[in-house]
Image: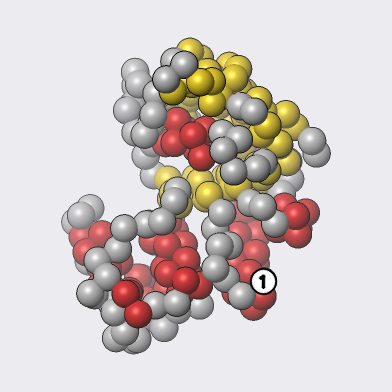
Amino acid sequence: MGETIRVEHITKQFRGHTVLDDVSLACESGRIYGIVGYNGSGKTVLFKCICGFYFPDRGDIYIRGKKMGKDVDMIQNAGVIIEEPSFLKQYSGLHNLQLLYRLNHKKDTEKLKRTMELTGLNPAEKKAVEKYSLGMKQRLAIAQAIMEEQDILILDEPMNGLDKDGVAHMRNLFLNMKEEGRTLLFASHNKEDIDSLCDEVYEMDQGKLQRIR
């Protein structure tokens, strides 16, 4: 195992309001890290800082030993779900994944089909994404996050909209990814998800992060 994410004493303010207050976190490969906290506590802002969408006002973030904002500007080789993904709603799920996959000059359609099947979607389904249920959209978002076999996954409420079977399916998928040596960092309001998946659990409260398990 090796360290993949290191957050060192970061602070982030918006219009004078402190959203992240001296936050530190270290994540290793082959482990799952959960963050709990009420809406507005700072979880999503932390994830956006780790990804490079925001830069902290103070402190440093390292991804695989590279300093964000200096060695790299955006996180690389990572699957990310933060807020609702933007899909082209008039196209099928497979077509959406193909368009995104080809941005990196890749055309392995069979691999994309297998990825959709991993998340419980039928790649032969011609239904446009705009007609997907909330649960199907969430499955597609997870498929997008894992389709390039990224070794870091940052998932903000990945179980949103999933029914009981869908949640069980995704828990197994995430545990398999952990066994493959990936790093998973996710936020959830669901105590059962946290209890069944996480090696370490942190609570975000008023911008401060504290380990609680």
* SS assignment at label 1: helix
Which amino acid type corresponds to the residue marked 1 in the rendered image? Ala
From this view, report whether residue 100 is shown above or below residue 117. above
Q: Does residue 133 appear left or right of residue 39 in this picture?
A: left
> Between residues 58 and 39, which one lies in front from this camera angle?
39
Q: How many marks?
A: 1
Residue at the spot 24% in from the left edge and 75% down from the top edge: 91
Disc 1 packing (10 Å; few <14; some 14–19; many ≥20):
few
> Between residues 92 and 150, which one lies in front from this camera angle?
92
- Specify the quadrant that holds the N terminus: top right
Residue 8 in sight from this viewpoint: no
Quarter location, residue 195: bottom right
- Specify the quadrant that holds the C terminus: top right
Q: Does residue 156 appear left or right of residue 84 in this picture?
A: right
Residue 41 in sight from this viewpoint: yes
Q: Does residue 13 appear left or right of residue 206 in this picture?
A: left
Residue position marked by numbered label 1 in the rendering? 168
Quarter location, residue 103: bottom left
Q: Does residue 2 appear left or right of residue 75 in this picture?
A: right
Residue at the spot 74% in from the left edge and 45% down from the top edge: 199
The residue furthest top is 58
From this view, report whether residue 72 is shown above or below residue 79. above
From this view, report whether residue 7 is shown above or below residue 57. below
Q: Position of residue 150 (x, y in %)?
A: 44, 50
Colour scheme of the rendered structure: secondary structure
Residue at the spot 38% in from the left edge and 61% down from the top edge: 144
Q: Position of residue 171 (x, y in %)?
A: 65, 64
Q: Position of residue 64 (x, y in %)?
A: 48, 31
From this view, report whether residue 125 is shown above or below residue 130. below
Q: Position of residue 67 (x, y in %)?
A: 42, 21
